Amino acid sequence: MRDDHEEARLDALYQLKLLDTSPSESFDRITRLASQIFGLPVAAISLTDRDRQWFKSRVGVAHCSIPRDTAPCAQVAESSQLLVIEDFSADPCYADSVLGRAGTRFYAGAPLVTRDGYGLGSLCVLGTEPRKATDAELASLVDLAAMVMAQIELEHAFGRIDPVTGLPTRNQFRDDMADLERDHPGEQRFAIVVDMARDDQISRITRALGLARVDDFIREASQALRVSLGPGRIAYQVGNAQFAFISPPGVEQLAYVTLLKASFEAMHASSSVRFVTNVAIGVRSFIVGTVSADDVLRGAASAAQDARGTDNAIALHSPANDIAHRRQYGLLQDFGAALEAGDELRLMYQPRIELATGRCLGAEALLRWRHPKLGDVSPAEFIPIIEQTSHARPTTQWVLDTAMDQLVEWTPSGILPMLSVNISAANLGEADIIQRIQRALLTRNLPPGRLEIELTESAIMDQPDQALAMLRELARTGICLAIDDFGTGHSSLAYLQRLPARIVKIDQTFMQNLTEMHGPDFVLVETMIGLAHKLGYRVVAEGIETPEAAAILMQLGCEEAQGFWFARPMEADQFAAWLSDRQDDETAEPSYI
Ligand code: C2E
Ligand code: MG
Ligand code: MG
């Protein structure tokens, strides 16, 4: 069994991640020099692994490793001492070694020693004749070994030290977390992320003052942070203007965070661009060894984002928020596959009823997603996530095509006059959206009056000018337009008046308490219906769950309604059956009259 020192030595070697890497000229030129100085054909940078000597660089050697057992380089690494073997055949230890048997007679090796004193291996020269080494030759060998170590440290530091602030980077954070896991498993600690400025503030400083000024700002901030953390606590640079550090053991979270806030205020006050930036701090507590370094950082950084919305600019990592963000991200990742798979998406159809007659005038196509692992995911959850991405376009196209195919299938029985399809705000920005909608109808020989496009009031108000232009063009094609979720989107009367829509669908939230005449919701709904009528719209009430609500709406002159009380959204065949049952019954008076 090897002792503790040997394990620590091996650990130091492994952390450098040098073993089994490709040859590199920066090391080879040192090896060549060693061979020239001694006038010998063989030289190598030889690293002492658990069971082998592995050559990072070699001159005159064919193989890239030899067994560690009886290798003189292993002795150099273990002792961290210079070793010269003038004649193998006269040396009791090495006469019968692997090298000795292969014809080596001379060896000189200088140790490669880390700053912490661990011998990693040796820079060595070998000859096939016995020989002595001069003091000058050996001094050069020691110098060259120091150059090898400098090169190793330089390459190791690359990517670990931020060039602007000189702070260790995220890579170093990961390695230091691994050390923490080894040395202090089970301890309770906090990771703290300090976000110096919002992204838009950084871009504004860049535009106004230039990149060099941003570097100055980040450098100043890092120095102030180092001072306020005190000696012994390492601050890492984990993002452009983002720093992280780990709390010392045994501190109480609230006290530490309060202290931190005071220090960050001091830090903030010392920065020359403090007036144009906002600092936010995120804290994530964790038990050492139970969470990966990346998760710890992600949690604290996401808390720092949450902190932007709070008064004191400090937020603790919330597992609930984290789970929600991760689910959203996962859904977004998986939705692309759903669009390709074809069998995860389907449409359901919810009828729209004319209140005065009880007739079904049309239906709304509602998208459904059955995720292979999560099961049914509501469009209220996934649509807001995907509609901000490049998935918006193919999704709407899929819904349009599927709904129009369904209309064609239903046409011979003449059962359904019209289908409504929802489109997203993002679709308004697609230059060819109108053509694509028209093409969906034309290729199936469907008249434009069979399709209604629903766009929410808030989507319209997101880009009012773009929406108006697009909706006007759409109206010219004869396709009917509905303003969805009306009452939730802050549109002005003046704007509403200009919209070429035919229908407004009053949002379901207004219907929930519509059980009695002259209650507060009654007044609201009455006003909305009156207003919509004055502006020339036909009114549809969404989310009707009771006969009372249906009766009130009819009295208020609302033309149509949609809701669970009439029918829930149904699968295509179920909907067709529901509709034909109902048409058989057409003469019956609606039951809410
Ligand atoms: P929406 O367009 O306002 O659709 C009406 C929503 O209300 C549907 O929810 C429907 O199932 C639900 N609903 C209908 N009657 C009742 C009722 O009586 N009570 C209650 N509580 N709810 C009722 P769903 O299908 O979950 O869709 C949610 C939203 O997702 C839709 O609201 C729409 O904005 C969006 N969405 C659905 N399908 C699509 C689509 O194909 N494309 C786009 N862009 N958005 C879609
Ligand atoms: Mg809708
Ligand atoms: Mg709606």
Image (tube, rainbow, N blue to C red):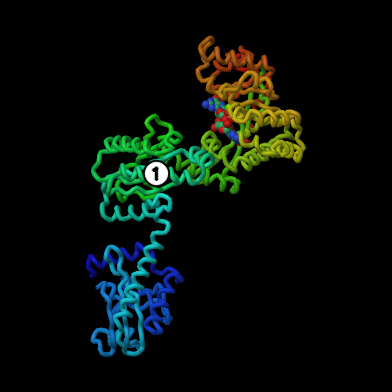
Residue 574 shows in the view: no
Give the quarter of the image for residue 539.
top right
To which residue does mark 1 refer?
220
Element at label 1? helix
Residue at 32% of width from left, 86% of height from top? 106
Horizontal arrangement in the rendering, residue 467 relative to residue 324 (left or right):
right
State the quadrant of the N terminus. Answer: bottom left
Residue at 40% of width from left, 49% of height from top? 165
Residue 541 shows in the view: yes
Q: Amino acid at mark 1?
A: Glu
Give the quarter of the image for residue 67.
bottom left
Q: x%, y% of residue 413?
A: 72, 33
Q: Is residue 317 above or below residue 1?
A: above
Q: Is residue 281 above or below residue 592?
A: below
Give the quarter of the image for residue 368.
top right
Horizontal arrangement in the rendering, residue 378 relative to residue 499 (left or right):
left
Q: x%, y% of residue 208?
A: 53, 39
Pick whichever, 263 or 178, lies toward us. Answer: 263
Q: x%, y% of residue 166?
A: 39, 52
Quadrant of the image where one finds ligand 3: top right
Does mark 1's beta carbon lie closer than 8 Å to ligand 1? no
Q: x%, y% of residue 357?
A: 67, 18
Q: Is residue 217 above or below residue 530?
A: below
Horizontal arrangement in the rendering, residue 369 relative to residue 230 (left or right):
right
State the quadrant of the C terminus. Answer: top right
Direction top: furthest residue: 518
10 Å crowding of disc 1: few (<14), some (14-19), many (20+): some
Q: How many marks?
A: 1
